[in-house]
Image: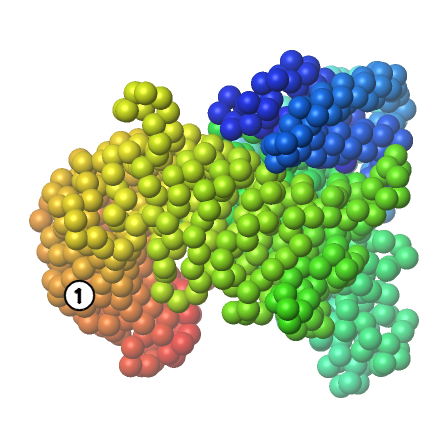
């Protein structure tokens, strides 16, 4: 994993060479050296990507260790020397000389490593890797089989049998089974493959295990074993001859092909032409894969099957079958066994491995000890069955995806991680290339990890377009920790907060200690976690022991809220990239932060403070978050804030931005945040043309607070030609002058109005926004009891969310919301009905009602029924906490009958009529 260290070094040099960097005066004197070094390191990065792709194991080779250590030392030394140039003005000449010496030495070190890399010969490594994977694949086929039959998954088995034997016309159908390693894909495929009805239905059955390092010839031979008589002459044929032979053996026959464990779309492309498509009606190809991208690429529409985790009953039945077979068990063993099964978190592989290891252990005290920490019990399995299965998924990742996945180990186990925080920390750590669309690159990496079933989605946005939070399974978390402990990318230490009556709360280096699992035994004041560069063999013990110099990130978790002031030894952490001082409220801006010029991510919690002009020293800052408790207090930034040229996300509950300074004698030209993506929440009194022009590239913008003076918003907002998401909180005064949709940028896709008390007629203006897809009206966004829509509009609106208002009557037709997909009403306690014409909106998929009158549910049911009568896909209706607590009778229209469900107040009721 030396690639991560080289990538981080590359990001640091790129930031120094950036054309809009405030450090250009420093880099300008050494630009030639920096550029030459950048070129060398870029070549090294390309080499490493290819080298790591073919590396046999997760153990670093000697060359990778050398590259990793040289990259870390070079980056650290450059950062320290640049810091001297910036902060030690009285020694600036000497500091420049030391920086020049550092760059020359760095070039020599990189040249030495490059010479070593050109000698690398990888012959023979790939063959050994193939052998390892193929041997392992064959040995894991039966791990999840218990007594030669599958336990649980009855519904999925039934659906799969139906999809396999249904009479489809046309080309053979491809059915992917997709899910994370160990979830039971192969077991389910085998169960239906050997089912009697399937054996009778198909003329030919053939199975091939593909695995990571696939061999197309081996796949073809595996399939031919089931379709023709095999002899040595067949094995000697070329790939093309084998493919032709397979195709001829399947012609005009109804066949079932199973391709188990496909890892990439390229594999599918390599074999798909071998399967005939004419005169083969009713044929099926069943794929198992860990990658959703493969399933979408190869599968027939609507036939893909996603394998989910087992529920508690299924988990217990599988555990009981594996641990006890047909033995009777005492109530004591059953009670503790159910706890163990539950702590396997629904992953069949874990359940079977744990049950197998406990099968020969019949001491109840031993079982109780396992129940306390099932994950450690699995990790310590001598055969490493779970580790090996899930390790394959990790090995198949690219270098940058491995680094991003390992970052999940920073967060507490089983925690739900906010995606924005995760991605912004990836950006700050230098995991991603410095491109204009860093956020897009981060989203792509996350989606890749989700597609590979390594990351689990916890929450999505209401319009289903964005992942809001995510997590990893316990075993993936353990895998991340094991890789972190190897020290290949970074190491982790915990820092406890210490209290001193004269100093308050502070971060103490004396309290930094090796990482341990976060448990309930946290210190009273909580815990911070530090990421450090690994120990280097080339460094002196003194440098390796200088933990503050090696620390590049500080995160905080599980901290108690405190109103005590926080003082810290921050000045010693010279090379910090990420700093979170959250959950501890600080009384003024920590001036020591101003020396941390390499910070890219800074998050603070405060009651109130003044931001000093020296904030411009944080020239690397990408994300700046200030949170507070209670009512948002206006935080005024100095003019120097515009010097943060790398700033991408500015999030403050209420912020005042002054006009940016002029960049020259030309009064019409001002500095601006050229990379800005998010700004919230701007005070409504700083909507001047200069401020709006300074954030002209912003994509997400929020305003907060009323100002009685003319803010100028209605004439300036149109300059934001990249704006996609816009929010207003308590800002009716700046919205009232707006009389036309043309005031808003045409690019606007999402709009949130909160406590703006506008008249409902204002929605006629909003309806004319040409690209609006999401509209959220929250806490009396509109004032009044009747919403009468007068214009046809909302031509692209997909989600309408209304929360907490006094609306009683709503008059509209399907023409007013022609493409609406999701209607969400929450705490609409006076609304008695909704437009029944919504039944004619063909795109409508969901009506969700929370804390609303029961009568609204009846309207939703009528809309649902009318849609069905019209032949449309019926809308999904979900009701929770209906006001009055009445019992609601709901019917679900299921393909095999009608099921009635009763829901009481507090129940969430998804249903389809």
Q: Nearer the viewer, residue 176 or 35?
A: 35
Q: Nearer the viewer, residue 419 or 576?
A: 576
Locate the N terminus by quadrant.
top right
Dot 1 alpha-carbon crowd within 10 angstroms: few under 14, some 14 to 19, many 20 or more: many
Q: Position of residue 674 (x, y in %)?
A: 42, 30
Quadrant position of residue 676: top left
Q: Left or right of 687: which side holds 146? A: right
Is 565 placed above or below 650 here? Answer: below
Locate the C terminus by quadrant.
bottom left
The residue drawn where x is 46% and y is 53% is 626
Q: Left or right of 473: which side holds 510? A: right
Quadrant position of residue 642: top left
Q: Position of residue 571 (x, y in %)?
A: 65, 48
Quickly name the residue at label 1: 807
Q: Does residue 682 show up?
A: yes
The residue drawn where x is 55% and y is 69% is 564
Q: Position of residue 718 (x, y in %)?
A: 24, 34
Label 1's element?
Answer: loop
């Amino acid at each position: 994993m030396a690639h991560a260290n080289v990538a981080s070094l590359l990001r640091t040099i790129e930031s120094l060479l950036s054309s809009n960097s405030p450090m250009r005066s420093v880099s300008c004197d050494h630009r030639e050296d920096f550029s030459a070094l950048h070129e060398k390191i870029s070549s090294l990065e390309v080499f490493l990507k290819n080298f790591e792709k073919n590396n046999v194991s997760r153990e670093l080779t000697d060359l990778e260790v050398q590259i990793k250590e040289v990259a870390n030392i070079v980056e650290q030394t450059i950062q320290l020397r640049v810091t001297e140039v910036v902060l030690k003005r009285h020694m600036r000449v000497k500091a420049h000389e030391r920086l020049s010496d550092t760059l020359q030495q760095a070039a020599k070190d990189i040249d030495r490593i490059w010479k070593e890399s050109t000698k690398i010969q990888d012959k023979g490594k790939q063959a050994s890797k193939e052998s390892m994977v193929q041997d392992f694949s064959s040995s894991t086929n039966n791990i999840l089989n218990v007594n030669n039959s599958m336990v649980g998954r009855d519904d999925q088995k039934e659906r799969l049998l139906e999809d396999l034997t249904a009479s489809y016309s046309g080309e053979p159908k491809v059915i992917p089974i997709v899910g994370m390693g160990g979830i039971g894909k192969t077991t389910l495929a085998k169960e239906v493959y050997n089912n009697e009805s399937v054996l009778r239905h198909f003329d030919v059955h053939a199975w091939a295990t593909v695995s990571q390092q696939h061999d197309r010839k081996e796949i073809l031979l595996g399939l031919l074993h089931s379709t023709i008589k095999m002899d040595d002459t067949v094995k000697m044929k070329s790939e093309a001859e084998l493919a032709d032979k397979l195709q001829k053996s399947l012609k005009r026959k109804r066949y079932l092909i199973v391709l188990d464990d496909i890892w990439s779309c390229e594999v599918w492309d390599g074999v798909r032409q071998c399967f005939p498509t004419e005169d083969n009606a009713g044929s099926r190809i069943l794929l198992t894969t860990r990658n959703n991208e493969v399933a979408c690429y190869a599968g027939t529409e609507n036939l893909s099957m996603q394998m989910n985790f087992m529920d508690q009953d299924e988990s217990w039945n599988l555990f009981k079958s594996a641990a006890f077979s047909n033995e009777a068990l005492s109530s004591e063993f059953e009670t503790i066994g159910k706890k163990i099964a539950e702590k396997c978190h629904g992953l069949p592989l874990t359940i079977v491995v744990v049950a197998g290891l406990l099968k020969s252990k019949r001491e109840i005290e031993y079982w109780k000890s396992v129940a306390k920490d099932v994950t450690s019990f699995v990790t310590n399995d001598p055969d490493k069955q779970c580790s090996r299965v899930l390790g394959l998924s990790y090995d198949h990742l690219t270098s940058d995806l491995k680094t991003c996945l390992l970052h999940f180990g920073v967060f507490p186990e089983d925690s739900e991680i906010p995606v924005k925080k995760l991605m912004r920390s990836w950006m700050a750590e230098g995991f991603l290339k410095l491109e204009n669309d860093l956020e897009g690159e981060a989203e792509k990496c996350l989606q890749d990890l989700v597609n590979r079933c390594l990351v689990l989605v916890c929450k999505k946005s209401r319009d289903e377009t964005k992942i809001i939070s995510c997590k990893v399974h316990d075993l993936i978390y353990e895998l991340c920790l094991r890789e972190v402990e190897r020290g290949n990318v970074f190491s982790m230490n915990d820092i406890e907060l210490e209290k001193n009556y004269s100093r308050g709360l502070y971060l103490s280096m004396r309290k930094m200690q090796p990482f341990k699992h976060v448990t309930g035994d946290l210190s009273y004041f909580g815990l911070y976690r530090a990421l450090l560069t690994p120990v280097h063999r080339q460094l002196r013990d003194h440098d390796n022991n200088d933990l503050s110099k090696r620390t590049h990130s500080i995160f905080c978790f599980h901290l108690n809220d405190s109103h005590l002031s926080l003082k810290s030894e921050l000045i010693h952490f010279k090379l910090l990239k990420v700093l979170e001082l959250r959950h501890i409220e600080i009384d003024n801006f920590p001036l020591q932060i101003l020396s941390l010029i390499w910070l890219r991510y800074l998050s603070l919690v405060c009651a109130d403070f003044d931001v000093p002009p020296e904030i411009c020293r944080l020239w690397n800052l990408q994300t700046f978050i200030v949170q507070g408790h209670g009512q948002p207090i206006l935080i005024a930034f100095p003019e120097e804030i515009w010097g943060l040229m790398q700033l991408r996300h500015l999030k403050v509950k209420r912020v005042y931005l002054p006009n940016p300074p002029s960049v020259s004698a030309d009064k019409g030209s001002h500095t601006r945040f050229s990379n800005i993506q998010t700004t919230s929440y701007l005070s409504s009194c700083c909507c001047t043309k200069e401020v709006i022009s300074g954030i002209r590239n912003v994509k997400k913008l929020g305003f907060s607070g009323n100002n009685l003076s003319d803010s100028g918003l209605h004439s300036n907002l149109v300059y934001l030609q990249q704006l996609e998401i816009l929010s207003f909180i308590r800002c009716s005064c700046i919205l009232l002058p707006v009389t036309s949709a043309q005031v808003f940028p045409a690019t606007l896709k999402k709009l949130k109005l909160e406590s703006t008390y506008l008249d409902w007629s204002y929605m006629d203006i909003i309806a004319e926004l040409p690209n609006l897809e999401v509209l959220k009206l929250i806490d009396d966004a509109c004032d009044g009891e009747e919403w009468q829509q007068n214009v046809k509009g909302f031509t692209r609106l997909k989600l309408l969310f209304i929360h907490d208002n006094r609306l009683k009557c709503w008059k509209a037709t399907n023409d007013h919301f022609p493409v609406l997909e999701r209607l969400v009403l929450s705490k609409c306690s006076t609304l008695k009905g909704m437009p029944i014409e919504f039944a004619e909106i063909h795109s409508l998929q969901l009506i969700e009602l929370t804390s609303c009158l029961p009568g609204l549910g009846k309207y939703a049911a009528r809309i649902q029924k009318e849609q069905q009568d019209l032949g449309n896909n019926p809308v999904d209706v979900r009701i929770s906490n209906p006001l009055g607590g009445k019992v609601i009778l709901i019917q679900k229209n299921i393909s095999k009958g009608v099921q009635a469900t009763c829901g009481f107040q507090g129940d969430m009721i998804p249903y389809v009529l």
